Image (tube, rainbow, N blue to C red):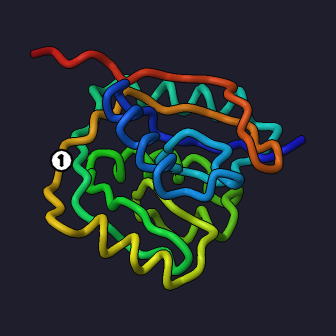
Amino acid sequence: MSALIVAAAFGAAAQASLDRLREQWFPPERNQLAAHLTLFHALPADALEEVTAALTRVCEQPAPAAEVTGVRSLGRGAALVVASPGLERVRGQLAAGFAGRLTRQDAHGFRPHVTVQNFVAPEVARATVARLSEGFVPWPLELTGLTVHRYLGGPWEPLAHVGFAARAD
C-alpha cells in the first residue's frame, strides 16, 4: 500500500490558472498531476480513516486566506510561493497529531508552494524563474479544503476531499 498525500484544494479559477502554468512550463512527459500545494508527502498508508478524521476537525473553520507572493527556484524547476499563516497553523495542528509518524521530509518544516516546473536543466529553471518573476504581482489564492491522495508511483489516486466551513459573512 502506498503512502498518503495531503494537499490543499483550490477554487476552480485558481486551479485552472495554476494548471495552465504547469502545462506551459512542466515537461509534458513528466506532468502527471494537476497543480497542487502539498501539506504532507507521505503519511502512513494504513491511516486513511485517521487522516480523514483529522482533516474533518481542522476544516471546521473557514478557509484560511492565502496569497501567491513570488517565484522561487527549485534548482531544477520553479515554484510559486504561497503565504498563508492560517494554512501553516492548520498544517501544524495536523502535524502535531501525526508526531512520531512523519517522514523526515514532512517533519522538516513547511514552505508552501505550487510547483509549476520540475525535472529540467538548471539553466532552463533559472530562465523560467526569471520569466515568471518579470512584472510579478501578488495575487490571492482561494483555498477550499484539504484532499487526501494515494501515491501511485507518479499519478495520485484521489481518496477524500474535506471542504472548509463556510464563512459567516
> Of all residues shown, which one is farthest toward the bottom?
123
| 122 to the left or right of 163 | right
Q: Name the image quarter holding residue 72.
A: bottom left
- Residue at image mark 1: 139
* Residue at image point 55% right, 32% down: 147
Q: Position of residue 126 (x, y in %)?
A: 42, 80
> Of all residues shown, which one is farthest toward the left?
169
Instruction: Kindly state the secondary structure of the residue where label 1 is placed.
Output: strand
Q: Is residue 110 visible?
A: yes
Q: Position of residue 94 (x, y in %)?
A: 51, 45
* Residue at image point 50% right, 24% down: 56
Against 104, residue 155 (above or below) is above
Asked whether 132 or 15 is in front, the reply is: 132
Against 96, residue 165 (above or below) is above
| 98 to the left or right of 83 | right
| 127 to the left or right of 167 | right
* Residue at image point 37% right, 24% down: 12
* Residue at image point 27% right, 51% down: 84
Asked whether 67 or 3 is in front, the reply is: 67
